[in-house]
Amino acid sequence: MFDLSAHPGRLFLFATLMPLVPAIVLAVGGLVRHLTRGCGGWQGTLHNLLGGDRSLPLAGYFTVLFMMAAAGLTIWGAVRFFSDDGTHPERWAEQVGWIDIGNVRLGSEPAGPSSALYLGYRIDRLTVLMTCMVTGIGSMIFLFALGYMKDETGIVHGRRGRFGRFYLYLSLFAFSMLNLLIADNLFQVFVSWELVGVCSFFLIGFYTEKKSAGVAANKAFIVNRVGDAGFLVGLAVAFTTFGTLNIAELNEQFAHGVPHGISHGLWVLLGLGLFCGAAGKSAQVPLQTWLPDAMEGPTPVSALIHAATMVAAGVYLVGRCFPMFAPEVLLAIAYVGLITLFLSATVALVATDIKRVLAFSTCSQLGYMMLAIGVGGWSAGLFHLLTHAFFKALLFLGAGSVIHGLHHEQDLRRMGGLRKVMPVTAYSMLIGVLAISGAPLLSGWYSKDAILADALGFSLANPGHFLLFFGPLLTAGLTAFYMFRLWLLAFGGTSREPDAHPHESPAVMTLPLVVLAACSVAVAWGWPVWDAESSALGQSLAAVAPHGHVTNGELAHKLAHSNHLAAGLLALLAAVAGGGYAWVRYGQRPPTSDQLREPTGVFANRWYFDALYDSLFVRRTVQLAEFTATTDRTSPEQPTKRSVTLDGLLTGVAKLVAAGGAELRKLQSGRVRGYVLAMGLTVLILLGMLFAVLR
């Protein structure tokens, strides 16, 4: 088990299990505390120890320690991986049989007994980079939460704090994502996929006393189930066709085109099913409505969801299964990404809640990643996934610092002038704003330029799809505008709330901001740093990019490389224009009353997606439920009202039987002479009937 020389991949397995340890400890501790509540003696002492003022902060530090240990193990594993000569890939993969299904029929030929479902891990370059990102950013978020969630160690709004429960959910969330990353088969991915969804439900609805939090948690859970239904279709097609769910084996089947035994239609269905699941997790149109409402959870949860865990899972799945997608499906992925990145950016233009601006920004950036993979820019899309994780975690934690400093105020219209009293938060967030806008030499510049170059190359190779370049180029300008608008409204000018009394956050919260700001600057550097194509991280991904079935893919790749500089210059011009316009509107003078009024219109109403879904699905579902309820029972308001319902019919039969029984009961007088008389009459009647028949 601990033989790391023969199996160094186990370092990543141990890293995955690290967050599970505090989750189990906290769960057991919480159960014991619940069972000893109200007890005296040693049981009461144990209860006080588990729920005392000192034990809860210690639980937080305990969890942070294990998350940092996971980060240390992944870094150690990364060093071992990149120093390996690659001649023994079996050292980085193991699996054990889990469920023996038996004979699996493949087409017309039956296969022999097979342990068709496995538990296993497989470590490659993408896995290494993703696990390092998740554990590194997760450690910073866990550390930040020690300060942000400090109130949950005491009495909050008349209830007992839930500090331990918060870290339990957070640890289980991290474990689920890491297990998803190292899984070598789609079934194990799906199990972790569902665990991620359950953890997000718990964390989004963490403030159970708020109705809006419960509604948001339900919305996230239900919308993701829609996507997961498609994922299950993809799994069914893959397993029934090939008899395996191993990702490497499936990718090998599609390495050189449509494999034997599957029709083109099934190939398309397989890809659409997998992408449907990814669209749900990564909040792509039309399943994007849950992500902005997920802001009801604590801000560290928002940072973890948007940067390192849940939404990253969808893009990761598409990247991991890239060879399995037919050309038509890849084109559909590109256009879904295009629609998502543009629509989400337009909504962010008018959003006034600091966290919701960042939420719509996440939807938009995920659209960039999907578009990149759809046009054949596999390395560009996953490169942006990695860089985006750092500056989006920075931005969300910065927003959390602002909310903490303003005593839970989130409305940008009621902020202003915070850079004077919160300088660390202000300038850390400014680095994040510059990175997501694509400022040169920052991490976002390298990855966003790569996406736009691939989009331009694909558009030139396929002239009918020019929108796949023009759309993200325009949105680059919109991104710079709404991000600088956010920063200027929060930190620029003077305070618009004289009684706010803001303050800088404690060191346990500002230290993660500084670390993430440094990563947002330098994580994508290469040499020379001013060459957008020299990024060491980007080149590392490009070296292992799998073959995909993109229309005119080779020509598009050549054109992307030759036009990289042109695409980058156009993106920079768009960002400068967007950021400059934000400065003109919000930086030169205090915002006007018109700029601070409640937004209205299509953008403010999120393109009416929520209203449309409410009309088409939510209300119709409620009406169907009410109809079926009326067929199941009589109205509780009118219990005596006669109605033809299922409950009424069954009750009527019961009443009829009861009435018949009551009448028959009258014949049971208890007099023996009466019974003998009845029996005699019965015998006479039977004899009479017999005589009539024989005659």
Image: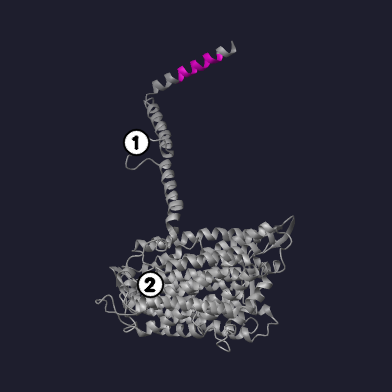
- The amino acid sitting under disc 2 is Ile
Say the numbered circle drawn on residue 354. 2
On screen, residue 296 above or below 14: above
Distance from label 1 to label 2 (Cα)?
53 Å
Q: Earlier in the sequence, mark 1 or mark 2?
A: 2
The residue sitting at the top extreme is 695
Q: Residue at x 63, y 60 (%)?
A: 270
Would you say 525 lies left or right of 629 here? right
The residue sitting at the left extreme is 499
Where is residue 373 drawn, in percent x and y? 59, 70
Q: Which residue is drawn at 50% across and 83% down?
A: 442
Count of numbered labels shown in the rendering: 2
Q: How crowded is mark 2: few (under 14 residues within 10 Å), some or many (20 or more)?
A: many
Instruction: Specify the segment rendered in magenta.
Output: 679-690
The residue sitting at the bottom extreme is 528
Quadrant containing the N terminus in the rendered view: bottom right
On screen, residue 299 above or below 240: below
Q: Is the magenta stretch mostly helix, strand or loop?
A: helix
Q: Nearer the viewer, residue 404 or 472?
A: 472
Magenta highlight on residue 683: yes
Q: Residue at x 71, y 58 (%)?
A: 106
Q: Would you say residue 148 is visible in this rendering?
A: no
Q: Nearer the viewer, residue 509 or 502?
A: 502
Where is residue 406 drawn, in percent x and y? 31, 76
Magenta highlight on residue 575: no
Would you say 611 lies left or right of 274 here? left
- The amino acid sitting under disc 1 is Lys
Say the numbered circle drawn on residue 641. 1
Q: Would you say residue 185 is visible in this rendering?
A: yes
Q: Residue at x 44, y 44 (%)?
A: 628
- Disc 1 is placed on an element classified as loop
Where is residue 520 drawn, in percent x and y? 48, 82
